[in-house]
Image: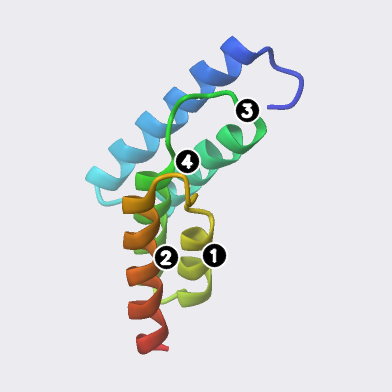
Amino acid sequence: MDGLPPPALGTLAGALNMVGLQLKQLGDQLGAEKYLGQFVTVLEKNPGDERDPAKVLMMLSQLAEERGDFVQAQTWLEKVDESDPQAWFAAQLKRGHLLGKQ
């Protein structure tokens, strides 16, 4: 992924997101986590990308929670940016929920 020009990174991010969402719909949670996690990584390396990863981060947290990995679920939620107050607040509520389950 390193060394790709910005347009290629944007195309890669879109493909990773699409594959991850499809795998989630097909019930392949581990595959979905893999591709959606890579999507987030690409966006982190391409800060000029306009896509907001908040929904994907919430989804990744849910997937980690469903497999019992509460630490990873919290880690995904910590990445939700405060620039979107509604998404950030939802992430904080979910973090509180997870703390109650631990």
Which comes before the other along the chain, label 2 or label 4? 4
Task: Determine which of the numbered discs, if any, sits on residue 64 in the image.
Answer: 2
Q: CA distance from mark 4 to mark 1?
A: 17 Å
Residue 1 location (% of width, % of height): 68, 27
Q: CA distance from mark 2 to mark 4?
A: 14 Å
Q: Is residue 27 above or below residue 6?
A: below
Looking at numbered disc 4 in the image, what kind of residue is underneath it? Tyr
**Do residues under tags 4 and 1 come within 8 Å of each other at their CB atoms?**
no
Determine the secondary structure under disc 1.
Answer: helix
Taking the spot 29% from the left edge, 47% from the top edge, the residue there is 24
Q: CA distance from mark 4 to mark 3?
A: 17 Å
Q: Nearer the viewer, mark 4 or mark 3?
A: 3
Determine the secondary structure under disc 2.
Answer: helix
Task: Determine which of the numbered discs, if any, sits on residue 55 in the image.
Answer: none
Dot 3 crowding, Cα within 10 Å, few <14, some 14–19, many 20+: some
Task: Determine which of the numbered discs, if any, sits on residue 75 in the image.
Answer: 1
Q: Quadrant of residue 42?
A: top right
Dot 2 crowding, Cα within 10 Å, few <14, some 14–19, many 20+: many
Q: Is residue 21 above or below residue 28?
A: above
- Residue at far right of view: 3
Residue 96 placement, left or right of 5: left
Which comes before the other along the chain, label 4 or label 1? 4
**Do residues under tags 2 and 1 come within 8 Å of each other at their CB atoms?**
yes
Which comes before the other along the chain, label 3 or label 1? 3
Which comes before the other along the chain, label 2 or label 1? 2
Residue 33 versus residue 27: which sits nearer the camera? 33
Determine the secondary structure under disc 3.
Answer: loop
Q: Quadrant of residue 56?
A: top left
Quadrant the C terminus occupies: bottom left
Looking at numbered disc 3 in the image, what kind of residue is underneath it? Asn
Which residue corresponds to mark 4? 35
